[in-house]
Image (spheres, rainbow, N blue to C red):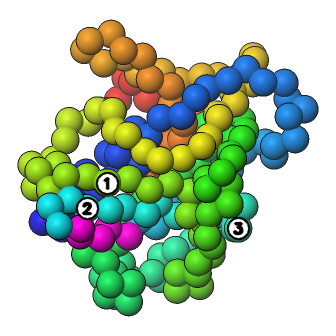
Amino acid sequence: MTGIVRLACISIAVSLTGAASALAADDGAPNLRGTRYCEIIPVYRDGLSFHLEVYNTLGQNDCPPAIWDAIDPKALAKELGAEEVVMNGPRFWVMDRIIATGTTKDGATKEFDGLAATQRATLSLPLRVIVFGSRPYSEKTIVRDTTYVYDAGKPVYEITDDAGNVYVMQTCAEIVDKTLAMDDLAGLGAR
């Protein structure tokens, strides 16, 4: 089950959606494009569903490799009383700014084996999604209050599904390709 949970969680984390906006660059939010971060996602069983808490390092640190690489997800899951801990990263923001409100902005900050991260989202998944998986790039409902800002004139990377729905890339990850860089994104579809 561990591999299935990991794939489902990573697929969900990659496909989480928020509102994109054309707000002015002086909205007060820091520029994030190209900023490194990581996510730690404890997965808790709740009857016939799973509850996921998404913590990320935005605003705390840039996910230092020495600390990130030293985290043992199995030991951390045991410590947290979770079924599993999904390590999602390192990642880099592709949008320019995030404007968060409510619990997304004010989530609790925890330290995971020396890595500070703030809870930014929660979601629940039925057992069938964990057991049977979900299609890549499928939509999931997530609880958070977030506006994503992409500055005019900067690159935006899109993926179109078989039904013609267009999704905008929020982040890129070094999970599969440790050498992936922002400059590689324009040609990513050719890989």
* 2 or 3: tag closer to the N-terminus: 2
In this rendering, the label closer to the viewer, 3 or 1: 1
Question: Vertically, is 31 above or below 168?
Answer: below
* Residue 28 visible from this viewpoint: yes
The residue tagged 3 is 60
Q: CB under 8 Å between callouts 2 and 3?
A: no
Question: Vertically, is 186 above or below 76?
Answer: above
Percent position of residue 64, x then y:
62, 71
* Residue 33 visible from this viewpoint: no
In this rendering, the label closer to the viewer, 2 or 3: 2
Q: Residue at x 68, y 60 (%)?
A: 106
Question: Vertically, is 81 above or below 173?
Answer: below
Bounds of the magenta segment: 42-46
Percent position of residue 97, x then y:
72, 39
Q: CA distance from mark 1 to mark 2?
A: 5 Å
Percent position of residue 99, x then y:
72, 41
- Taking the magenta stretch, the answer to whether it contains residue 134 is no
Q: CB under 8 Å between callouts 1 and 2?
A: yes
**Which image quadrant is residue 119 in?**
bottom right
**Which image quadrant is residue 1 in?**
bottom left
Q: Nearer the viewer, residue 182 or 167?
A: 167
* 1 or 2: tag closer to the N-terminus: 2
The residue tagged 1 is 124
Q: CB under 8 Å between callouts 3 and 1?
A: no
Q: Residue at x 44, y 56 (%)?
A: 122
Amino acid, disc 2: Phe
The secondary element bearing badge 2 is classed as strand
Percent position of residue 50, x then y:
25, 61
